[in-house]
Amino acid sequence: MWLSEYDDGYWPQDLQTFFDNMEALEFYERDSDAGNDLLSNTNSLRMTTRVPLTGPYDDSQEFLHGKRPHNGEGVAIQTFIHPINADLETEMDPLEMLLNPEESSVEVSYIYFMAYDSVEWGIGFHVGDIEKTKVQFTKGQPTHVLPSFHAWQKTKEWDQVQKLGKHPVVYNARGTHATYFTAGEQVPTFDWTYPKEAWNFWHNLDVIFPWDYLKDDFKIKTDSNLNGLNYLTEVNKWGNEARGQKVPGEQ
């Protein structure tokens, strides 16, 4: 993936550093359509920065700027592997599908996390940004690539996607971290993607299967009131409460 940030931009952040700078609100109200489709649940817990922000443009806390990839590598990518519907001659249960990928259809979701979004048009700034690119496989062979941008995603067949060796190439927009298939201005979202910094994130994958979700590995370990909570099943909102006008896909 090509990142588009400038030197002082908003790079990927590791989850532990983020958790160490966040806490849980004592009161929260669930928004039924909020959250990421993989990292959300029935719980409505919201994180907020331990040190309050002075306003929507306050990015003065160092952790919000993330970590620039080094030699194409970077922070760990949460990598979800799960079965998807397929036209199969025989029915297989989810576990069997995952253990026998050459006989089934499987989707791999690469989740990359940024601590802060800076939106070009001046509204929609927010703490905590979960973005993803999915790759679908049928009978062991890649078939489709689906990058996410804001609240939407696009789909292309594997043969139509630019590649670096065997890896599909996508472009991550400056500031908003929306992901696209091409570099340049993106219409109608007004995002900009530049091939400024290569992030070969397949070097550092944290692979997660559906039966892993409740493991202790995914409990937050920090000295705030987040300690002991499972971030896959007990956290719904990953940033401070919104103020002012909202932008679709940038809550």
Image: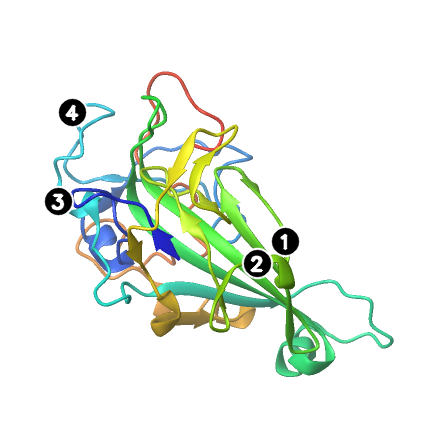
What amino acid is found at the position of numbered circle 1 in the picture? Lys
Mark 3 packing: few (<14 Cα in 10 Å), some, or many (20+)? Answer: few
Q: Viewer-nearest of labels 2 and 3? A: 2
What amino acid is found at the position of numbered circle 2 in the picture? Val
Q: Which mark is residue 161?
A: 2
Question: Disc 4 and disc 3: Cα gap in Å?
Answer: 15 Å
18 horizontally vs 204: left or right: left
Circles 1 and 2: CB atoms closer than 8 Å = yes
What amino acid is found at the position of numbered circle 4 in the picture? Thr
**Disc 2, SS:** loop
Q: Which mark is residue 199?
A: none
Q: Viewer-nearest of labels 4 and 3? A: 3
Question: In x, y percent, where is residue 119?
Answer: 33, 30
- Read off the residue under disc 4: 54
- Read off the residue under disc 1: 156
Q: Which mark is residue 62?
A: 3
Q: Going 17% across and 55% down the picture, which residue do you hit? A: 223
What amino acid is found at the position of numbered circle 3 in the picture? Glu
Q: Nearer the viewer, residue 236 or 157?
A: 157
**Mark 3 or mark 1, which has the lower sequence index?**
3
Q: Viewer-nearest of labels 3 and 1? A: 1
Q: Going 33% across and 20% down the picture, which residue do you hit? A: 243
Question: Disc 3 and disc 1: Cα gap in Å?
Answer: 37 Å
